[in-house]
Amino acid sequence: MNKFFLLIICVVLTHINVQAQSRCSKCGGSGRMTIFHSMATYGISRSKQQCPVCRQWFLRGTEHKEACDRCGGTGRVTTAMDRRNQSRESKVDDALSYLTPSELTIYYNLVESLKGHYETVPCRLCQGRGTCISCRGIGYIGEFPCPTCGGLGRCSSCGGMKIEAYQKLVEPTPAEKERIQRQIAELVKNAMNRR
């Protein structure tokens, strides 16, 4: 029973963590390799060179690309590890096929909660008030416009929005992650038992 529970957790985590395949190092993931690089000849050279792949002739100095011979033009290379991961993904897909639509929604929500969520950050300069720290939102210091906010009365950092321009990622704690993983495993296990 514990082995089955552990297997479900491993399968689910593998499904979450193994989404990206390896990018081809020869073509950089573009799927096209450069046979001839572009270079200026200033109209002096009119000689041609033959592409060893397609056997066509090109003016020296013009760029020519062909489908990458390492990845077959896909931009991705398949390693033994990738093939194992694809096998695991097919097992996960098989396990997920036993979930009802409502259970599938719960599953995807739990998977998303494992990634964490973004929260807005209160402006550090005005401490989330949105008003200028020099004139305290009035716009004037004495009878002159505030030099910090230009007489607008808004915080010069957040522009009166009260929040920073960025959001911070809040990840679940290890205990929360463990609880969520247990819920996912229990959900999948119940679905597998129904089949």
Image (cartoon, rainbow, N blue to C red):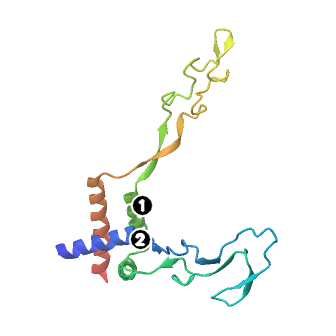
Q: Position of residue 95 (x, y in %)?
A: 35, 79
**Image quadrant of residue 89?**
bottom left
Q: Position of residue 59 (x, y in %)?
A: 76, 79
Cα separation, mark 2 vs mark 1, equals 12 Å
Q: Amino acid at mark 1?
A: Glu
Q: Is residue 73 left or right of residue 86?
A: right
Name the residue carrying label 1: 112
Element type where label 1 sits in the image: helix
Q: Position of residue 24 (x, y in %)?
A: 50, 75
Q: Nearer the viewer, residue 20 or 35?
A: 35
- Residue at 78% from the left image edge and 75% from the top image edge: 45
**Image quadrant of residue 68?**
bottom right
- Residue at 27% from the left image edge and 79% from the top image edge: 193
- Relative to residue 170, is residue 140 depicted above or below? above
Name the residue carrying label 2: 104
Farthest front residue in view? 44
- The quadrant of the picture occupied by the C terminus is bottom left
Answer whether labels 2 and 1 touch (C-beta < 8 Å): no
Element type where label 2 sits in the image: helix
